[in-house]
Amino acid sequence: MEYLNLISIPAIVAAVYLLIEVIKKATKNNEKVSHFYPLIGLGLGIIAGIICFYFIPDIIPASNVVIAMVIGGASGLSATGTNQI
């Protein structure tokens, strides 16, 4: 199941991107909230990394929870960067 390690990062990026879009629609692009989108993406990515590490350990290439948090956080920030492109 080597291929499962390849899909974890894009899956987290896509999920965080969709959640940020939902937050944007819910706040109607409020200027105060828009400054926190990268931080929200980072937090959601970290949470997703932790969830993947404990509940779906085959999907994330991490040997401990700290590495899973870093992978998730980087994926969450990637979702924010994808939005800016």
Image (tube, rainbow, N blue to C red):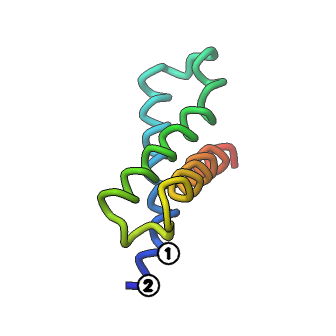
Between 49 and 13, the one lying in front of the other is 49
Structural crowding at the residue carrying mark 1, measured as other residues with C-alpha within 10 Å and reported as few (<14), some (14–19) or many (≥20): few
Q: Is residue 47 left or right of residue 36?
A: left
Quarter where residue 52 is shown: bottom left
* Residue 10 % position (x, y): 51, 63
Q: Is residue 55 left or right of residue 33?
A: left
| Residue at mark 1 to residue at mark 2: CA–CA distance | 8 Å
| 1 and 2 marks in contact (CB < 8 Å) | yes
Amino acid carrying mark 1 in the image: Leu
Between 69 and 39, the one lying in front of the other is 69
Rendered image: mark on residue 6: 1
Q: Which residue is mark 2?
A: 2
Between 3 and 14, the one lying in front of the other is 3
Q: Residue at x 54, y 33 (%)?
A: 40
* Residue 35 % position (x, y): 66, 24
Q: Residue at x 43, y 40 (%)?
A: 19
